[in-house]
Image (tube, grey):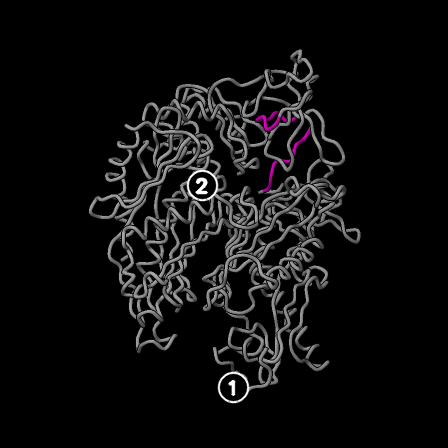
Amino acid sequence: MAGQTDMELIKNGIRKDGRKPDELREIKIVAGVLDNADGSCYLEWGNNKVYAGVFGPMECHPRHKQKADRAIVQARYTMAPFSVNDRKRPGLDRRSTEISYIVSQAFEKVVMVEDFPKASIRVDMQVVEAHAGTRCAALTAASVALADAGIPMIDMIPSCASGKINDVVVLDLNKEEDNYGQADLPLAIIPSTGEVVLLQLDGHLTPDEFELAMDLATSGCMDLYKKMRDALENSYGGKK
Amino acid sequence: MSNDSVSNLMKGHMESLAKEGKRADGRGINEYRKVTIETGMLNTAEGSSMVHLGKTKVLCGIKMLIGTPYGDSPGSGTMTTSTELAPLADQSFDPGPPREQSIELSRVVDRGIRESRMIDFDGLCIEHGAKVWMVYIDLHILDNDGNLFDCCTLAAAAALSNATIPNVQHGIADEDVKLPINCWPISCTFGKLGDSVILDATSDEEGVMTARFTVAHDENGNLRAAQKGMNGAFTDAEIREAVKTARASDSVLRDALKGIQ
Amino acid sequence: MSGESSVTSNRKLVLPGDLIETKSKPGKGIFRSEGRIHSSVVGYSSDKSGYINVNAITGRYNPKVGDKIIAVCAETGPSIWRMNIGSSFNSTLHHSESGWKVPFGDTARFLSIGDAIWAEVSMVDASGSHQISLKKDDCRKLYSGNIIKINPTNVPRIIGKQGSMISLIRDNTKTRIQIGQNGYIWIDGKGDDIALAQEAMETIDREATSEGLTKKIEKLLEK
């Protein structure tokens, strides 16, 4: 976050890319795009492009990570070298390790892990093009992939970020807004209960701004949830 | 479906079909699966492609950065190829540092492109001895149903054919130009299945075959690179025959590549 | 909170978390929360015989006692075999359930890695581990033919109403076919006939929910 700058990101209630403060970027979600994985999803969010794939439940490797009474969720988030303008070296760095970890934690809350003692559920998220909000896009894609894999869950998890640009609280920052804005708040919720399973904040928000940012991100998540449901309904036809 | 146990029955069935020139999925022994190529879909890459070969899916991104040339070639750009066996592509792709499998794959694809002089490295010189363009070919395996070698080589060639040199972004010139391409290398990968040799193996066939042979030709029919892999063997006659077959069978891949120009 | 769609009739697609209106007892593919029943998977709800189940459309095979399945040997132990049946974990075949007299340590001589059998699920315990048996009915080691794998939820479609689809395939290809509830299918016959039967079943697996599938398979088999 660069903080206060002269960059005008919003004028008369319209952002540089034409969106209103509470508008999401264009999102496309397709379930079941890969053949090998037990479940998969391809998601486009603005210019973000993410693939998520799930294997499991299956025997837990390495053995020492196994839990006797439940399954563990092993989520991994990585960005392809060509996903950003300055080529990124392949493999995990500290940022992707942190994201992998908090995503695993989010899923452990909704996946019915007690049904599969000693097993592991492997979730892999690959960001192939990045334009801000990739952790939200990856988490959302992974939720759809888990449902596509038939993994029992209490609900899917939509994830969306809100933020602040030029002192205005807005929904879903794009790359420029993320670079020159004043705050970034990624959020993930369980739609049926409203519980928060992921929340981070970067930047500066007054208590009132925080309340507004939470409201915006929550409603963004609910809109996103409808698209996730549509993607699964499209893949499975509702026919029989 | 996970492929961790190919049954012995499947092995016997494939071997007897192969003796009659046939495959379990209905193809002939020298027939490629359906190929589709898409290019230019990634905005952050200087060139990109997505290739489907049967169910195998590979995404390729080209990044071009400015760097210093190697001491022994001060007027030439450089090229680096790497492959990522993304864990979502195959249950057996464990996350972690590159394994021998992925390194062999990168190096074979790299040789096919480099030895055919597909890229004109001297044309990538910005300032002799000081500044050159470095081309990074990053192959991202998204779905593995066998024959990563041919799928990756094709994805790399397609992405390079669609790449532009980012002069403007790096302040080198007033406009971006297409990366100059000299020729089109195509690789063909064969497998030894029982006593037969098959082209373009699926994952199940790779679980049964005992040896692998890849050969890359340019469009003049000259060989540019070859690699024998796995721990079995081919007869001398089988290798020579495979090389001849490659020249006949690679046209379907060449046509697909021409189709996206 | 939206996202709770209420389902009262059968045959509507439900997603994880969806509320199901029912007075029946809880079965599979569901969970209870605050006294109400919700689906836990993507599937179709089925309210029958006093039980509410959601039949998952995707997912690995979940073994049930009595299921006939095809298993492939993954490992041999001194008195057992570990068998791959396409579920989350491998299954165990105990020497005492094999029908053979197996000297201790000599298991590989009877069934080695990669060998396949037609067997029955004999036990599933509370922690989810399961065992299979070769001693029931026509269970036996398989010596010829080929084994293909399809999505276990499409097994009923491959069998068809009163076996109509599978009979159509068998009669037109002159093959012997045994369908495991785990989605592993054994086909035996001449090479070309096996390939045709395989193509028919893989087509059904890919297009299980589309209209006119029977006609399409009939045409395919006329080749």
Could you say which disc has been placed on residue B145 in the image? 2
Q: Which residues are magenta?
A: C59-75
Q: How many marks?
A: 2
Which of these two is toward me, A16 or B66?
B66
Q: Residue under mark 2: which chain is it in?
A: B
Callout 2: 10 Å neighbours few (<14), some, many (20+)?
many
The correct choice, above or below, for A46 with respect to A52 in the image is below
The correct choice, above or below, for B169 with respect to C81 in the image is below
The correct choice, above or below, for A113 with respect to A221 in the image is above
Left or right of residue B261, residue B210 in this image: right
What amino acid type should be assigned to the residue bearing mark 2?
A: Asp
Secondary structure found at label 1 = loop
Could you say which disc has been placed on residue C159 in the image? none
Q: Respond whether the residues carrying marks 1 and 2 are from the same subunit.
A: no
Left or right of residue B127, residue A34 in this image: right
Identify the residue at the far front of this view: B72
Give the x, y percent position of residue C14. Answer: 62, 49
Give the x, y percent position of residue C86. Answer: 59, 34
Could you say which disc has been placed on residue A8 in the image? 1
Give the x, y percent position of residue C183. Answer: 55, 32
Callout 1: 10 Å neighbours few (<14), some, many (20+)?
few
Report how far apart the C-alphas of labels 1 and 2 lie in the structure: 49 Å
